[in-house]
Image (cartoon, rainbow, N blue to C red):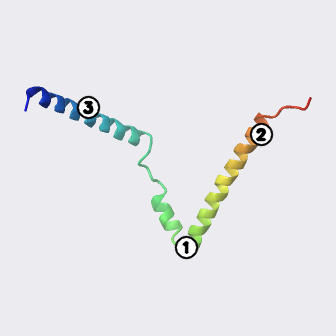
Amino acid sequence: MSENVVILMLAVSTFLGALGLIALLWGVKTGQFDDQSKFIDAARYDNEEDLRDAAMMDKKKKEHERKKKKEHERKKNYMPAD
């Protein structure tokens, strides 16, 4: 193997390793790996009825946020009649 090829392979592998380390640090910093509610929810919603209730509440929350956003957009685009 040529000496230039070995140097190129070392440079590329070092660059990719540094890129992976930067991505890992960014993920840790922004909380991508945090799942604070995992164990709490596992204990709290341990039967099917509670899981259905939690899913329904989550669905209602998302629907409410969507309606709120839609209402805000409607108010933002309001133009009085001429």
What residue would you read off at disc 3?
15
What residue would you read off at disc 2?
74
Distance in Å between CA atoms under marks 2 and 3: 49 Å
Compare residues 48 and 13 and report the one nearer the observer.
13
Q: Residue furthest right?
A: 82
Query: With respect to residue 66, does 39 lie above or below?
Result: below
Which quadrant would residue 3 be assigned to in this image? top left
Residue lying at 61% horizontally and 58% vertically, measured from the top left? 58
Distance in Å between CA atoms under marks 3 and 1: 48 Å
Compare residues 39 and 24 and report the one nearer the observer.
24
Amino acid tagged 3:
Phe
Residue lying at 53% horizontally and 73% vertically, measured from the top left? 47
Q: Quarter of the image for the C terminus: give it.
A: top right
Instruction: Indicate which disc residue 29 carries.
Output: none
Q: Residue furthest top?
A: 4
Distance in Å between CA atoms under marks 2 and 1: 39 Å
Give the mark nearest the N terminus, 3 or 1.
3
Residue lying at 58% horizontally and 70% vertically, measured from the top left? 50
Percent x, y for residue 16?
Answer: 27, 35
Amino acid tagged 2:
Arg
What residue would you read off at disc 1?
48
